[in-house]
Amino acid sequence: TQLLEQSPQFLSIQEGENLTVYCNSSSVFSSLQWYRQEPGEGPVLLVTVVTGGEVKKLKRLTFQFGDARKDSSLHITAAQPGDTGLYLCAGGLWGGADGLTFGKGTHLIIQP
Amino acid sequence: EPEVTQTPSHQVTQMGQEVILRCVPISNHLYFYWYRQILGQKVEFLVSFYNNEISEKSEIFDDQFSVERPDGSNFTLKIRSTKLEDSAMYFCASSGAPGTGGKDYGYTFGSGTRLTVV
């Protein structure tokens, strides 16, 4: 059974600060996806990383896939109140129809 | 931006009743999925569907569950005899051709159906 552990579970910081949240596993995944989920809504895909060591940037968000493809991080620069939300990581395995394994998420609050 | 549409948004049913949750995936996607999320818990995989048949299913997806793509556009999840513990948000998702890279590697999730079993 693959597990993804996300840390921290909760994070509250001031607007303008930088932060990093983590997604760790003892298993190797072929891809790692990051989602953002608003209350009562479905997860919305932010990015997919597929190559060990890969770094992708989405405006102020930087995503990295670990070299061994077991972990990933999400770094937000100069956080804004609009970044408040639940951030989920999800791992996929080889084979197109395999289900994703989700972490429990990091609840992020950016205070003005 | 193409969307995955789910109906109904809320469903309340009595224990033991059958429910059918409906989804319209993105039209050119090849893979279709159902996930559930019990309140306060993580999103859990139920089943994937490809080429008109189940491709993978989790331990949660027991004989009480079934999926169907009856008309080439709709994708349904049926729970034959609901139990209290089936209360959850059920998300449908679709994806393109994994392994090809790019946007199609990720999923598009619907907004979910909140199922309450009483």
Image (cartoon, helix red, strand yellow):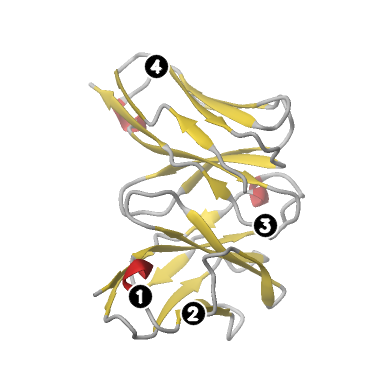
Name which residue type carries label 3: Asp
- Disc 1 element: loop
Q: Give the distance between the C-alpha atoms of the residues marked 2 and 1, in whole angstroms.
A: 10 Å
- Disc 3 packing (10 Å; few <14; some 14–19; many ≥20): many
Dots 3, 2 in contact, CB < 8 A: no
Name which residue type carries label 2: Gln
Q: Is residue A57 visible?
A: no
Which residue bears the numbered disc 1?
Answer: B83
Name which residue type carries label 4: Ala
Which residue bears the numbered disc 2?
Answer: B64
Q: Give the distance between the C-alpha atoms of the residues marked 3 and 1, in whole angstroms.
A: 26 Å
Dots 3, 1 in contact, CB < 8 A: no
Which residue bears the numbered disc 4?
Answer: A78
Q: Position of residue A33 (x, y in %)?
A: 58, 41
Q: Give the distance between the C-alpha atoms of the residues marked 3 and 2, in whole angstroms.
A: 21 Å
Q: Residue at x 57, y 64 (%)?
A: B59
Instruction: Choose between B22 and B28: the one closer to the eye.
Output: B22
Indicate which disc, 4 or 3, sits on the residue closer to the N terminus. 4
- Disc 1 packing (10 Å; few <14; some 14–19; many ≥20): some
Which residue bears the numbered disc 3?
Answer: A98
Q: Is residue A24 visible?
A: yes
Side of B87 where B59 appears, left or right:
right
Residue B46 lies in quadrant = bottom right
- 4 or 3: mark nearer the eye: 3
Q: Position of residue A30 (x, y in %)?
A: 72, 42
| Dot 4: chain letter | A
Relative height, residue A30 to residue A83 (above, below): below
